[in-house]
Amino acid sequence: MSDGQPAENARPSQRLVALVPMRHHSQRVPGKNYRLLAGKPLFHHILTTLLQCPEISSVVVDTDSPPVMDSLRREFPQVTLLERPEHLRADTVPMNEILAYDTSQVEADFYLQTHSTNPLLRSSTLSRAIQTFLKDYPTYDSLFSVTRLQTRLWDQLGRAINHNPAVLLQTQDLPPVYEENSCIYIFTRASLMARRNRLGDRPRLFEISPEEAWDIDDELDFAITDFLMSYFRATSGEAQGGDL
């Protein structure tokens, strides 16, 4: 495990494009992507974070949402807009197919995908993730962010996953397992198309803090995220990520 600091052999001259897919329709929360959070449309938060990351060459939004497109043109003219084709707009279309289209439209050496529903991600965490990936590429051909879990996990059949019920260890002494949190993915178009998946053959796990990994999926998530955003601003604290 390294310290996640910028590596001397990182290659910032290579073009890395950030992709942010956004549907107009939201199944659980109507208008989620452009609903106000802490006084701003939700998607404004992640765009601001991405634009502050020096390793990112450009930011691309793929959307079929008229309110998002209108706001982008007015307030984020530096962001590239891709209007999502009709055949990719259904809820059943896999994200990897959307990414295959996006990477065919915007050329880059590497791509970073995140979501508007991750407003607590920090630009410093994105920088560490990118530097970690570049340092280890091509030994690892992709990277995805994870959250550490150290709790007693069971499967649906009542079988212990990561612990021995006969040996009651403290949870902090359990071997950690890691949850894919969908906050950060870094990959090449070649690996994406070879597997039709943003995770390549040799993905690298990159750990981030649970606070940054919060994903907005319902009304409770909105309330919790709004509280956390206010708390971080009031305390000037920074959730620290890391890498495995």
Image (cartoon, rainbow, N blue to C red):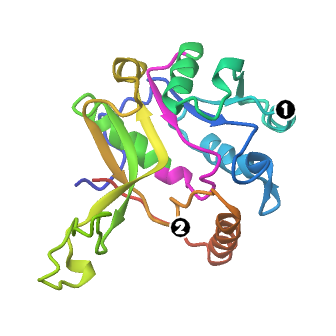
Q: Position of residue 145 (x, y in %)?
A: 41, 49
Residue 73 is one of the magenta-drawn residues: no
Residue at screen point 68% across, 27% down: 89
Instruction: Answer with left or right where residue 209 lies relative to residue 59.
Output: left
Residue kind at label 2, given as amino acid type: Glu
Q: Horizontally, is 36 left or right of 161 in the view?
A: right
Query: Is residue 85 at least partly visible in the picture?
Result: no
Q: Is residue 228 visible?
A: yes
Of circles 1 and 2, the one toward us is 1
Which residue corresponds to the image point at 20% horizontal and 68% vertical from the top-left? 175
Q: Which residue is mark 1?
A: 66
- Residue drawn at (22%, 68%) of the image: 159
Horizontal side of residue 211 vs 134, given as left or right? right
Type of the residue with mark 1: Pro
Position of the N terminus by quadrant: bottom left
Q: Which quarter of the picture shows residue 231?
A: bottom right
Q: Residues within 10 Å of mark 2 (few under 14, many from 20)?
A: few
Query: Is residue 122 on the magenta stretch?
Result: yes
Q: Identify the image quadrant of residue 236.
A: bottom right
Question: Which residue is outermost to the front?
Answer: 157
Per the image, the residue denoted by label 2 is 238
Span shown in magenta: 107-125
Q: Secondary structure beneath disc 1?
A: helix
Q: Is residue 72 above or below residue 175?
A: above
